Image (cartoon, helix red, strand yellow):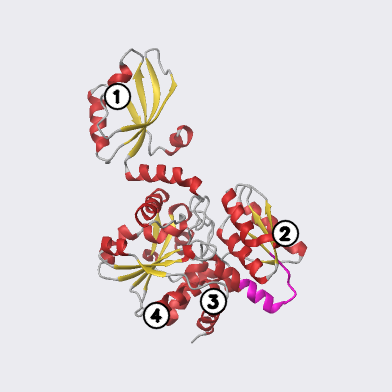
Amino acid sequence: MTDFTDAALAVTARLRSLFPATPLQRNAYLSALYDADIWLKREDLSPVRSYKIRGAFNAMRKALEADPDQDLFVCASAGNHAQGVAFNCASFGKRGVIFMPVTTPAQKIDKTRAFGGTGVEIKLVGDYFDETLKVAQEFCAKAGGHFLAPFDDPHVIEGQASVAVEMMDAMEDAPDMIVLPVGGGGLSAGMKRYLDEVSPDIELLLVEPLGGASLTAALAAGEPVTLPRVDSFVDGASVARIGARPFEVLRDVPPESVLIAPEDRICTTILTMLNVEGIVLEPAGALSLDVLPSLKDRLRGKRVVCITTGGNFDFERLPEVKERAQRYSGIKKYMILRMPQRPGALRDFLELLGPNDDIARFEYLKKSARNTGSVLIGIETAKPENFDALFARLDAGGFAYRDITDDQTLAELLI
């Protein structure tokens, strides 16, 4: 065994004093759907509902081994890392100061405070994470604390490898394929390094969100690069720049083994797992399942493990998730309709709707001409093809309209 393998085994054993191994569960629904043997490694069932507790534990343990008198730990995080750090501060009996952006949802702030108890102080600073991080690091240096990085740290990578250790221990035979998310790279680097040493024949597929594909960009450039823009919807995996240390492990990953998940499609996966299986996943936690439809031919007859990395889902986001899922699935559209300004015009339009077409939004925008007015209309239907029939009837009826569902600029302004 290498030093890394020994370290991963050791941290896994030490974690048992903190929490039991997260379940590895065969999912009958997905197995039947893809004619495969599909298992879920349920990191969403850890004490903090994500795998982040592992790396934070190992980094804190190593820091205390080096300096037993260290009493202050500092981090910057908008979510799961903060909760992992808070939980471990309470467990080790150490003080923690956690910096979070002002825009962090109250649910995440409250959970972090609950895990940390009276020993953890939360400071809300900055509108964006980069601002928060800068202030946190400056505070840490002045206060003499130990800064806990979320992923670009060898001890964090080592701790996240415990996911792979537990998974392999729970299986009689090694899986054919493992699918896991990649954000900053701590989990993927830790798992890849361990699996390369103990079971190198396993096919490893990494998934990152479309709006935060930092690994894809780094592989293309041959080094970590900073993305000019990041979509923060998948907040647990949307990272502008993959960590330097994780990339050293991931630089030999074939580009075709890194899959991209569009944010709106992830919403359909979240709803499916919630409605069909009763499993609550945050956007990052659903990444490994979201790509399964695109892998259908490759999955048949294989044993596959998907890592569900987190379940810290704020249910106040559910309306947005449903909206994005409906639009991606093609069963909800928005249009601007030029409505004639005459008696009976609205009735004429309503009569063109099919039996499964429902108006979800109706809003007069303004009179665009003497005889017409613009109306914003949102319509939900049962099947995407119903819109083809509706548009045909609108054309035949002489109605002027514009489908703005996929027009990002207009959608942001009007919807």
The magenta-colored residue range is 59-73
- 3D distance between C-alphas at marks 4 and 1: 62 Å
Which residue is labeled 3 in the image?
Answer: 16
Whichever of callouts 4 and 2 sits on the residue coming sooner in the sequence is 2
Which residue is labeled 4 in the image?
Answer: 199
Which residue is labeled 2 in the image?
Answer: 138
Would residue 140 be found to the left or right of residue 33 on screen?
Answer: right
Q: Callout 3, which amino acid? A: Arg
Provide the secondary structure element on which disc 2 rests. helix
Whichever of callouts 3 and 1 sits on the residue coming sooner in the sequence is 3
Looking at the rendered image, the disc whose residue lies closer to the viewer, 3 or 2, is 3
Looking at the rendered image, the disc whose residue lies closer to the viewer, 3 or 1, is 3
Q: Return the residue nearer the eye: 78 or 260.
A: 78
Seen in the picture, residue 358 relative to 345 is either above or below; the reply is below
Which residue is labeled 1 in the image?
Answer: 350
Q: Residues within 10 Å of mark 3 (few under 14, many from 20)?
A: few
